[in-house]
């Protein structure tokens, strides 16, 4: 019995080594590397929803409600250029079916509205002017188009191919086609191989994805979250050129090799993130705050590491312009990153000394799902929860560690807003301190009030320490910490691309 168990274990290890070796040989293609090099894009949600205080509509909103005062696509793309974005992804048709171009296959489009400007054409013109690459989002799910519900799925597939032909032949080079809404039918009904081949025939250098790209090993059409993705997981929609899982974040050690029909394929993850602190994709009439620059900076480093990329949603308002406070936020982020006007290469993040090192807490939730180790693991979507409103997290650094940068992500408690989609985040820490241990004694190097979504602490002098401690001294409710990082500012460099 022992011999059989030993032999089976050896065989399993052998298979793992062989599989790992095979996966290691798979590299990104030349076309995929162009996408990795772009790295940082601006997502643009604008359409009939912008004028109806909603995120998802069902295709019944009157076309007359689309009425921007003066759509200024030049301002959108000029802002993208100044903010250091390398490309934009324009939402040409959301789930409602309303099209931002004059499509001969529907009357639910800008040509039938009070403002007939072809926004796809205007954005394409501005992209050419400012040297920005153009990608297009197109929802598979169409809640307005009657053929979407035809019992023969090929009928609607032909409708999509007609519209994709318009989009891919009238507006110059398109770097990406970003499909969404695949959950609305059985996966096979979209006939992705046929649609993919159609796109490649029209534009061979256009990369293609379908949102929620990866399935689970138990059920291929079940959505797999990036935090759970493992090398070799099945590709749900195939073929595609990259992965998306809106709006989740990859692990720091995000794998790249996925499979379909025993064929392995290299797939980067293109993250999607809202600039809005309320997680609205389409702009609302009321002014809403943008995320803080500390959070945006840290999320940029995280989402562009290890060949992954990010598109940050910056939605124009009802006047057809990007709002001044949101423009100022992305320009401030560009200055922080050193990429204003797109002239400098994208930066790497700082080398985190605290990943997965020993960590303890004085007061923790009894639920192991929220153990102290969740505060410095490889995920921003796991977190430690305290056992009370006062608690401490303590990490054992390597002896003699020198650092001058500390980052803390507090996990929020979220509640829905009136549109049933957007959220407001609540944070609880009201006072905290940072202590370091050196030469047998603890000393306080920082005192602060709120942490919020993310707090970057830059120390004026280097600390040399063997331990660091986060003390939560006061909170309005039991708080949670998603990430606690320590770094040397000299470790920042130029973003590296793995070939």
Image: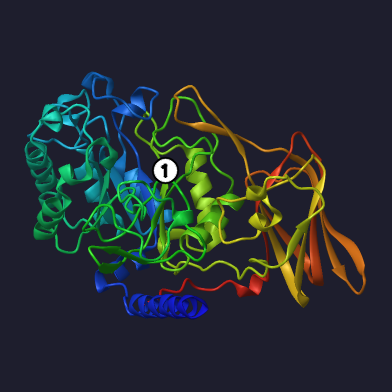
Which residue is labeled 1 in the image?
314
Q: How is the image coloured?
A: rainbow
Mark 1 crowd level (few <14, some 14–19, many ≥20, 10 Å Cα): many
Q: Left or right: where does residue 92 sit relative to residue 12?
A: left
- Image point (53%, 55%), residue name: 299
Q: Left or right: where does residue 173 sit relative to residue 81?
A: left
Q: Give coordinates of residue 480: x percent, y percent.
A: 68, 45
Answer above or below: position of 226 versus 305. above
Look at the numbered disc 1 and give the secondary structure of its residue.
loop
Q: Left or right: where does residue 400 sit relative to residue 410?
A: right
Residue 472: tell me if it is visible. Answer: no
- Image point (31%, 76%), residue name: 26
Depth order, front residue of 390/439: 390
Depth order, front residue of 45/69: 45
Answer above or below: position of 400 versus 56. below
Q: Quadrant of residue 484?
A: bottom right
Q: Give coordinates of residue 467: x percent, y percent.
A: 80, 67
């Amino acid at each position: 019995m022992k011999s059989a168990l030993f032999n089976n274990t050896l065989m399993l290890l052998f298979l793992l080594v062989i599989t790992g070796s095979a996966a290691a040989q798979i590299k990104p293609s030349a076309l995929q590397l162009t996408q990795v090099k772009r790295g940082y894009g601006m997502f643009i949600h604008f359409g009939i929803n912008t004028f109806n205080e909603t995120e998802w509509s069902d295709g019944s909103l009157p076309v007359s409600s689309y009425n921007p005062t003066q759509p200024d696509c030049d301002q959108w793309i000029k802002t993208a250029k100044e903010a250091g974005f390398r490309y934009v992804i324009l939402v040409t048709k959301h789930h409602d079916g309303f099209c931002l171009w004059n499509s001969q296959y529907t009357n639910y489009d800008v040509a039938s509205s009070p403002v007939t400007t072809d926004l796809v054409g205007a954005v394409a013109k501005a992209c050419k002017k400012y040297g920005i690459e153009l990608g297009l989002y197109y929802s598979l799910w169409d809640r307005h188009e009657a053929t979407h519900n035809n019992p023969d799925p090929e009928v609607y597939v032909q409708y999509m191919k007609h519209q994709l032909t318009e989009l891919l032949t009238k507006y110059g080079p398109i770097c990406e086609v970003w499909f969404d809404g695949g959950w609305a039918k059985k996966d096979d009904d979209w006939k992705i191989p046929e649609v993919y081949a159609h796109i490649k025939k029209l534009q061979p250098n256009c990369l293609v994805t379908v949102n929620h790209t990866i399935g689970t090993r138990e059920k291929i059409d079940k959505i797999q979250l990036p935090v759970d993705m493992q090398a070799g997981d099945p590709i749900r929609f195939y073929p595609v050129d990259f992965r998306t899982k809106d709006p989740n974040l990859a692990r720091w050690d995000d794998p790249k090799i996925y499979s379909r029909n025993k064929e392995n394929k290299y797939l980067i993850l293109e993250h999607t993130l809202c600039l809005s602190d309320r997680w609205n994709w389409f702009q609302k009439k009321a002014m809403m705050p943008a995320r803080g620059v500390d959070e945006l900076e840290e999320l940029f480093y995280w989402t562009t590491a290890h060949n992954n990329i990010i598109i940050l949603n910056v939605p124009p308002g009802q006047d057809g312009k990007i709002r001044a406070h949101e423009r100022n936020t992305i320009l401030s982020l560009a200055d922080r990153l050193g990429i204003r006007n797109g002239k400098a290469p994208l930066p790497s993040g700082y080398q985190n000394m605290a990943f997965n090192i020993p960590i303890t807490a004085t007061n923790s939730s009894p639920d192991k799902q929220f153990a102290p180790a969740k505060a410095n693991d490889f995920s921003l979507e796991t977190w430690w929860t305290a056992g009370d409103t006062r608690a401490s997290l303590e990490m054992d650094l390597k002896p003699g560690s020198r650092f001058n940068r500390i980052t803390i992500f507090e996990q929020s408690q979220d509640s829905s807003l009136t549109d049933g989609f957007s959220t407001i985040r609540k944070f609880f820490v009201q006072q905290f301190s940072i202590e370091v241990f050196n030469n047998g004694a603890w000393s306080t190097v920082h005192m602060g009030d709120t942490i919020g979504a993310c707090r970057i602490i830059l120390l004026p002098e280097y600390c040399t320490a063997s331990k660091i401690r986060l003390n939560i001294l006061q909170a309005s409710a039991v708080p949670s910490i998603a990430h606690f990082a320590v770094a040397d500012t000299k470790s920042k460099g130029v973003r590296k691309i793995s070939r």
